[in-house]
Structures are given as structure tokens and as C-alpha cells.
Amino acid sequence: MDVLLTSKQVITQIQNLHNEGKSLKKKEVKQLYPDLMRSALHYYPSWQHALEESKVG
């Protein structure tokens, strides 16, 4: 599995999506931002954990 983002970049991208009012639903992020989802699940045990780590979930 190729991980294209660092854990810090994952958090920053999640925060940016949140600040832009974009959906953070797992299914939608997986479709629209597959690299973000793949990287998030590499660093965190679940998408929910990544959201909590980014302080938006």
C-alpha cells in the first residue's frame, strides 16, 4: 500500500476539508480523496480516530 501523505499532512487535509465545509463522511472522502483515506488508515486505526486526532470529529 502506497502512503502518499505524512500523518501531519493527513491531519492538515482533514482540518482544511472541515474548514471549507466539505463532508467528512468516510464513504464520501474515500470516493473523492482516496489518497487521504488510504494515508489516514495507515496512521490511525480508523477514520473516526483520524477525525478525533484532527480535533474535528
Image (spheres, rainbow, N blue to C red):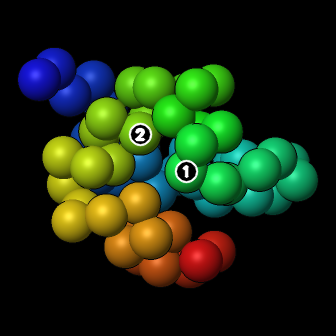
Q: Residue at x 21, y 65 (%)?
A: 45
Looking at the picture, how far across and down is residue 24, in whole percent? Answer: 67, 54
Hey, which residue is sitting farthest right in the picture? 21
Q: In the figure, 25 relative to 48: above or below?
A: above
Rendered image quadrant of residue 13: top right
Looking at the picture, how far across and down is residue 30, in whole percent? Answer: 51, 34
Looking at the rendered image, the quarter that the N terminus falls into is top left
Q: Say which mark, if any, is on residue 53.
A: none
Of residue 9 and residue 2, the one placed in the foreground of this image is: 2
Q: Amino acid at mark 1?
A: Lys
Q: Amino acid at mark 2?
A: Met
Q: Residue at x 27, y 49 (%)?
A: 41
Secondary structure type for disc 1: helix
Query: Mark 1 highlights which residue?
Result: 26
Q: CA distance from mark 1 to mark 2?
A: 8 Å
| Dot 1 crowding, Cα within 10 Å, few <14, some 14–19, many 20+ | few
Q: Residue at x 58, y 26 (%)?
A: 31
Q: Is residue 29 left or right of residue 39?
A: right
First in sequence: mark 1 vs mark 2: 1
Asked if the residue at tag 2 contacts the one at tag 1, i.e. Cβ–Cβ closer than 8 Å, the answer is yes
Looking at the picture, how far across and down is residue 12, in whole percent? Answer: 53, 51
Looking at the picture, how far across and down is residue 2, in whole percent? Answer: 16, 20
Q: Residue at x 65, y 54 (%)?
A: 25
| Dot 2 crowding, Cα within 10 Å, few <14, some 14–19, many 20+ | many
Q: Is residue 18 left or right of residue 38?
A: right
Q: Is residue 37 left or right of residue 41?
A: right
Secondary structure type for disc 2: helix
Q: In the figure, 48 relative to 14: above or below?
A: below
Query: Mark 2 highlights which residue?
Result: 37
